[in-house]
């Protein structure tokens, strides 16, 4: 809440440390004195609100309850959770909410003028958008972990926050517990970012790891990821590459200053990958990872989200379970690698509460201004995906009869795609041609345009049995 501090005979009226606009109008030495004064003052109360108390929300409550002394030391304030807003207040939860006003309505939280920061951890788009706009207009800073919302309405929300002198923090929206947003917005600002290669979805990485390591079937591994709180309420976007594309769109906006609707990022999910693909890749010395890629080539930005074969000895290939991995390259610093929990209750809550601490101390407002400036750079043109050349892994389930392999090789050859290896395990002898053979090919580098043209022809072959798979191989 507001404090008044006497400074050098003059009386400065500030909201400290919360209202950074007032804070920044004072002179540097005055700011310094104010900060020290604040640290000497017995900790005041800093009332906060929480909207959503599911996986992430309960983690936030646990940190607030279990780390009170640490948070007070970090902020000079006592963070006091006043309001918890959920869909169903009667539901039993993994957190003790007995000391708080729990409600299904935002009204009391909005009306409480002592609350200056609200953690909003609810999925979906329409209702979180309305809530957050309402909270901003009520004079509250907002912390969100909702990447789907930011991808769709980020500009509107940021402009609203900026015009009202408020702040939106969203560290947890990308890569869970890994502090990549603050790294890009503050630590790497002396660099021109040239490449990002990342695993950004915990659920799909968990599924791929479980399938290979424990021979678990896809559905079982997905169910486990849901039980552990990694997956979205509707896990479709986790496994079809959309969640990764949303996170990549947010990162690319900050790192390269280029806005792109996430649904325009070329993307492919993991739904059609089976254990045999994972084993075949492993035999060849690779791991399959759902890779997000954004890199500058000849002043154009190449972006994609695809399951990709990565050499097994690379650290990104060794990223297992719900962990995420980000390699980010700056022109001055070179390549930085960050890895850690990309989903789950406590790692995500760690990022959310760090944002909350930044709101209380005033750091968030500075980061938010930096972020707005990063977003205002001249956008880079996108590299047409059809021009991008990469090696490929191709897998076909085909009728086990004469000329099938030759037909596929013929299509690839006519499109200028050179095969570098072919593998077909021995099949049962089926004289009537009803058997199914599994064909795995690796190609030399070929452009996406040529590959797509070949895909279209191969899809018309009547020898194909079930979905085919094509994945790039990371160089
Ligand atoms: P969750 O477990 O499904 O919890 C959602 C919470 O929101 C529930 O407490 C629910 O209330 C509440 N809620 C739903 N609609 C509401 C409404 N209209 N008003 C008030 N409360 C409402 O979701 P989550 O996993 O915590 O994820 C929350 C957000 O964080 C999502 O945007 C997600 O993408 C993001 N995120 C999640 C993770 C993760 O690992 N889970 C990581 C990073 C980011 P009830 O409990 O009463 O139903
Ligand atoms: N569902 C997301 C994931 C949560 O699995 O990565 C973290 O954003």
Image: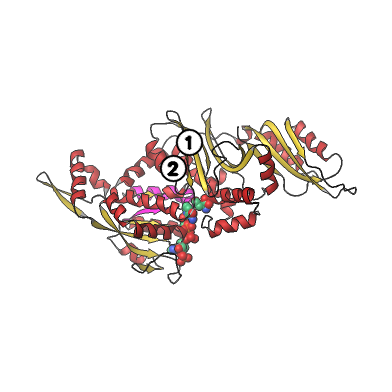
From the viewer's perspective, tell me whether residue 385 is left or right of residue 397.
left
Q: Residue at x 36, y 66 (%)?
A: 107
Vertical order, 195 against 80 (above or below): above
| Secondary structure category for the residue under label 1 | strand
Q: Which residues are magenta?
A: 139-162
Query: Does any portion of residue 18 appear in the rendered image?
Result: no
| Tag of residue 180 | 2
| Secondary structure category for the residue under label 2 | helix
* Neighbours of disc 2 within 10 Å: few (<14), some (14-19), many (20+): many
From the viewer's perspective, tell me whether residue 158 is left or right of residue 212.
left
Whole-percent x and y of residue 431?
90, 47
Pick the front one: 328 or 314: 314
Query: Residue 319: within the magenta?
Result: no
Pick the front one: 90 or 337: 337
Question: Going by the picture, which residue comes out furthest to the front?
Answer: 214
Q: Residues under labels 1 and 2: Cα distance?
A: 9 Å
Residue that badge 1 annotates:
328
Whole-percent x and y of residue 177?
44, 48
From the viewer's perspective, tell me whether residue 114 is left or right of residue 399.
left
Query: Residue 144: within the magenta?
Result: yes
């Amino acid at each position: 809440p507001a404090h008044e501090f006497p400074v050098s005979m003059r009386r400065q009226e500030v909201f400290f440390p919360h209202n950074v606009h007032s804070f920044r109008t004072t002179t540097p030495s005055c700011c310094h004195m104010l900060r020290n004064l604040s640290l000497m003052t017995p900790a005041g109360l800093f009332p906060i609100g929480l909207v959503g108390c599911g996986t992430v929300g309960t983690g936030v409550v646990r940190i607030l309850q279990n780390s009170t002394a640490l948070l007070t030391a970090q902020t000079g304030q006592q963070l006091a959770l006043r309001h918890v807003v959920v869909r169903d207040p009667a539901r039993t939860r993994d957190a003790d909410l007995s000391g708080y006003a729990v409600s299904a309505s935002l009204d009391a939280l909005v009306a409480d003028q002592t609350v200056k920061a609200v953690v909003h951890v609810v999925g979906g788009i329409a209702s979180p958008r309305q809530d957050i706009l309402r909270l901003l207009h009520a004079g509250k800073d907002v912390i969100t972990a909702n990447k789907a919302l930011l991808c769709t309405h980020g500009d509107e929300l940021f402009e609203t926050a900026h015009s009202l002198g408020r702040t939106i923090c969203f560290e947890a929206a990308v890569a869970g517990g890994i502090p990549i947003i603050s790294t890009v917005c503050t630590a790497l600002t002396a660099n021109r970012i040239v490449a990002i290669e990342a695993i950004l979805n915990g659920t799909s990485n968990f599924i791929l790891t479980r399938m290979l390591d424990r021979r678990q079937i896809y559905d079982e591994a997905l169910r486990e990821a849901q039980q552990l709180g990694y997956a979205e309420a509707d896990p479709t976007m986790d496994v079809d590459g959309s969640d990764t594309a949303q996170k990549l769109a947010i990162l690319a906006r900050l790192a390269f200053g280029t806005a792109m609707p996430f649904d325009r990022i070329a993307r492919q999910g993991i739904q059609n990958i089976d254990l045999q693909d994972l084993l075949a890749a492993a035999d060849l010395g690779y791991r399959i990872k759902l890779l997000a890629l954004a890199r500058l080539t000849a002043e154009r930005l190449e972006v994609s989200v695809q399951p990709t074969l990565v050499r097994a000895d690379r650290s990104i290939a060794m990223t297992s379970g719900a962990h995420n991995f980000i390699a980010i390259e700056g022109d001055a610093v070179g390549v930085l690698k960050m890895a850690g929990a990309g989903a789950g209750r406590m790692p995500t809550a760690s990022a959310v509460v760090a944002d909350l601490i930044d709101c209380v101390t005033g750091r968030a407002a500075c980061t938010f201004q930096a972020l707005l400036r990063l977003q205002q750079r001249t956008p880079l043109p996108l590299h047409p995906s059809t021009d991008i050349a990469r090696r490929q892994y191709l897998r076909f389930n085909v009728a086990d009869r004469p000329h099938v392999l030759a037909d596929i090789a013929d299509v690839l050859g006519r499109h200028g795609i050179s095969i570098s290896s072919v593998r077909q395990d021995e099949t049962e002898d089926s004289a009537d041609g009803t058997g199914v053979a599994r064909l795995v090919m690796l190609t030399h580098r070929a452009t996406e345009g040529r590959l797509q043209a070949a895909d279209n022809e191969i899809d018309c072959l009547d020898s194909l049995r079930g979905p085919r798979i094509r994945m790039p191989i990371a160089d």
